[in-house]
Image: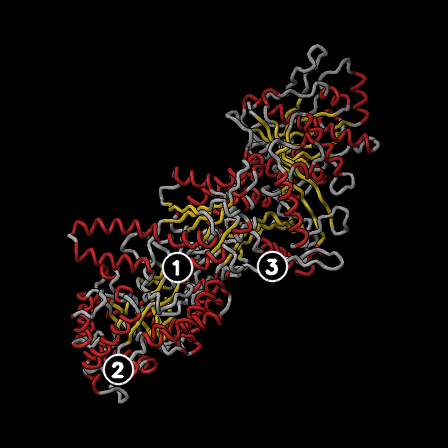
Amino acid sequence: MDADLDPLWQDMDWAIGQMLIMGWDGTEVTPQIRELITDHHLGSILLTAKNLKSAHQTAKLVQELQTIAHNAGHPYPLLIALDQENGGVNSLFDEEHICQFPSSMGQAAAGSPDLSYQLAKATATEVSACGVNLILGPVLDVLTNARYQPLGVRATSDDPQEVSQYGIAAMKGYKDAGVATCGKHFPSYGNLDFLGSSLDIPIITQTLEELALSALVPFRNAIATGKLDAMFVGGCGITNPSMKVAHACLSEQVVDELLREELGFTGVAISECLEMEALRTEMGVRTGTIMAVQAGCDLVLLCRAYDVQLEAISGLKLGLENEVLTKERVYTSLRRVLKMKRGCTDWAKALNPPGISLLKQIHPSHLALSMKAYDDSITVMRDNEKLLPLNESMHQEEELLLLTPLVKPLPASAMTKTILEGSTKIRSENPIHDKWIHRERSAIMSGEGVFRELGRSLARARHGKLLHTSYTANGVRPVHESLIQRASTIILLTADANRNLYQAGFTKHVAMMCSLLKASGHKKNLIVVAVSSPYDFAMDKSIGTYICTFDFTETAMSALVRALCGAFTPHGTLPGTLRKAPRKAVQSSAGGKSKTRTQHWLVEPYDVERDTKGLQDLLFAMVRGSAPNHQYFYAFGPHSFSLLSDMMMVEQQHEEEPKMEEQHFVVRNSSTGALYGFCSTYYLPSTFTGIIGAIFVDPSKRNLSIGYSLHRRAVRNLLQKHPDIKHFQLGCCLPGIFPGIPLDHSDALSMSSAITPGSTTSSTAASSGLKSWLSTTCGWDLSPSSSSVVRTRKIYNLLLPSLQTWSSPPDLPTTLQLAGISFDLIPGGGGSSGRTTNSTPNSSLSAEQESVLSFVSSHSTPEILTLYRLALLQSPPLFSSSALSYSSVSSASPTDPTTYNNNHHNNNHNNTWIIRAKIQSQSQSQSQSQSSQAPGVVEGGGGGAGGGAEQVIGTIIISSDLGRELHLPSLSSASGSSSGGTGGIIAPVVSSMTGQQQQQQQQQANLLLVLQGLVMLGLRQNKREKMACCLLSWVSNGNGSGGSGSRDGGQQQNNSVETLLGMGFEVQQVWEEVVNGVEQFASLA
């Protein structure tokens, strides 16, 4: 033993007693607790609500404990520890002498660290007057996973810097009142996984690196002040790649290495209570106590069970005897504990607590401070319909309905005090049977009574009639429906609805009822009040008026009544990342664009292994929040945004061409793995074009700048990774989930026939809002006449709903014949069939297939060219190209369906084809016309067949499976399909007939004629395959029908779509693809 320690401590029983902190049940000193102090030299006591009835009784109890210790020869007073966090977690309750203050989160909502300091100092002053010298606070946990953690409003927020700021302010308040401080719960209770079994313990799954960036920040900052006397180390497990810990407080890695070596903490480490069932079952209390000390804990907590406490004492003695523990280790802890005692107490103070006399003096000023704090903490997150205050939204004679959950009274409350007093009386007067009856009745009555005074206060304050009833997990009952019918305004309370799911269901049911009644002309205002966690409906914008109180103590409910009735205007804000910054539009005097405040979220590259599940969940959320005409989301999965293996195969066969690249990004919760937003990007080296393929954000996380952050990172990455980039494109045809900006049908076509049933003004507004966001926030130039806009085009998906009853236009075959246009059918799958040539890189393709690729390459985009390559190389080469022939159309039967002359049709199952439109040379056309006796058969052989030159003037793909594989929205959703299946026609590419000198008007007519012919043959092929309906994807002027980027392209495109609508199609979806020059985003380079 060192010279700085009293010789008394040579007796190891005395030293061991100073390393334990214990409690008991009861409001009086028991023989057991007396024995622990006198015989086992216990040096620290934890008081709980079960020990305390009032301030006066507490002061007397503590004084008695200290007197016992003094008489037993203790050199220093006992440490008397207490949980007095405020809000719903107070051990000492006394309406006359102890003031109630807001919870940690409620204090942060008030927005003043100075106020938090004052509240902490007031709290510590009050408990110190009763003899308490160690307060178990402040709470330094970062509520990373805010919605599902039991810690709830006991934590300040999910922002580590904000937790640090308010935690340090509270710590200084405690210290200035003369009590010792204890930070908790190290390393963090803010993001725990719960495994379910009663023996299981919560687990931290974050890595040490992740903890260091968030959860450990407040602990590190508090330690750095030098004012933190103790640290409460939790009993949770830790499981990550670098650490496998069953209980943090028993781990040397956590206490000695992380807390002391890395964070530099030199104070007292206090363990979690070792009476937890999991620890007792796994290793026993003796072993657990030794392990806690070996790990670095200085005070081992055993809450109440006397036999367990004795077992812990015997364990430490046995550890010393067996040399598992050393005396040096015991003395190290002893010094730390004695240093803390010297800093917060002495015998004069311990034996003479000021008690009631001081409390009476300070009570008025503390009461005023309490009222101010609660008023400042009340937060109105939304009041869309201006329902507050009540006297401005309802008349006095109208009925107000209060719906409250059945909850357990708070431990430190008047209700609990009344129950305990009644229970004591029952125990003394009634037999055992009556005790059980009383317990059941009191539980129900107390649950209903928690908010009874709230109802009475509200009725008095508004001088009007109030209806009040509770609700339970039984849901909406007839009594609720009846009362809702009567009332004009409903106030509905929730308390941790994310953990008590029946409350969430009940609230949504009532909200739906109010909405329906309001739609039918009844006045039904709904106000939802979260009286515990503010996260219940923080992101549910369907709840128009949403108030947060952060606890449901009597004082908090009084503040709520004042807020509802207009006694003050609430100014509280949600702490942390949910803190609502004022979104004020800043309008320049010159009438410039308005600007909104933006946040910068951490954007990370998409990791397939890590983020696949999160992306799947995000897609499900998108389905739930999408407009009806975009419900095709349900068909997609995380893999839908990646370039396909087939595409890689195609590119490997064209190694002389640069490959399309991809890189995707996410905004994610690093603790839960949940994705809040996703952005896909691609790069086309052949055209030096960077593509934003998709940006979407969880509907519950919108308007928080997540989309902006994703877009900014995506553009910057493309600029930095590809210095030669020339263009930026919104929308991607491959993969084809978002070919462009989703538009309402009426945005795309100014004709009523283009509007399918179900399109609404709300979707028009959504489209307009999206364009506004892209323009004002993200920097896109969407004006077609602007010099920054390289190209805009609309892309349509069309549906022909009843294919089996459809018939082709009667005069179309004849018109095509007279125009000299012929068609042939080319199978997909690469070619062993047909004639091949070795003069091109595509040595596996037939001459006909090569002619298709050559035509598409000259008249469409690289994405469409890749699509055609996929179509030609994907399917097995089951048959060669065959001429498509038209049967004679007689005047007697003008609607008689024509057929292909395809000899292989009945013998194969290929489901991907290319239809090719050709025109013969002018001399051939004239010769054939002169030799024809009547409108008969026009045959087109293979490319160059018949001895004359032929020009390809159009192509189209027929394939439903390929469309689904490429995630085309129409084919993936297959709306309107039936048991007969859905056929697919994809990407028509049409060019003008340059061999003839035609005027522009005549050229357009021929373009439309070729398009009609291609689509007609595609429909016939699908009809022959017994398809019930047919989807036509990627109808666009950018595909060649109108010329990419031409000034009249939009009109030609509308004519194309109008022509197809005349053939029986309906518009399914419309997108607008936009291409800007790179200079538009030069500032992000």
The spot of residue 942 in percent (x, y) is 68, 27
Q: Nearer the viewer, mark 3 or mark 2?
A: 2
Give the label on residue 598, or none: 3
State whether residue 36 appears in this view. Answer: yes
Q: Amino acid at mark 2?
A: Tyr
Give neighbour class at mark 2: few <14, some 14-19, many 20+ (Cα, 10 Å): some
First in sequence, mark 1 or 2: give its number: 2
State whether residue 837 appears in this view. Answer: no
Q: Nearer the viewer, mark 1 or mark 3?
A: 1
Q: Which residue is mark 1?
A: 554
- In space, the residues marked 1 and 3 are separated at their CA atoms by 38 Å
Please tell me which residue is depicted at 62% across the width and 23% down the height of the picture.
1020
Q: Which residue is mark 2?
A: 76
Q: Check disc 2 and report its element: helix, strand or loop.
A: loop
First in sequence, mark 3 or 2: give its number: 2
Give neighbour class at mark 3: few <14, some 14-19, many 20+ (Cα, 10 Å): some
The spot of residue 892 in percent (x, y) is 70, 10
Taking depth in this image into account, of 213 and 126 the one nearest to the observer is: 126
* Image position of 685 with respect to 902: above or below: below
Q: Check disc 1 and report its element: helix, strand or loop.
A: helix
> Relative to residue 924, is residue 779 drawn left or right?
left
Taking depth in this image into account, of 1041 and 265 the one nearest to the observer is: 265
Q: Are marks 3 and 2 in contact (CB under 8 Å)?
A: no
Q: Give the farthest residue toward the bottom.
A: 3
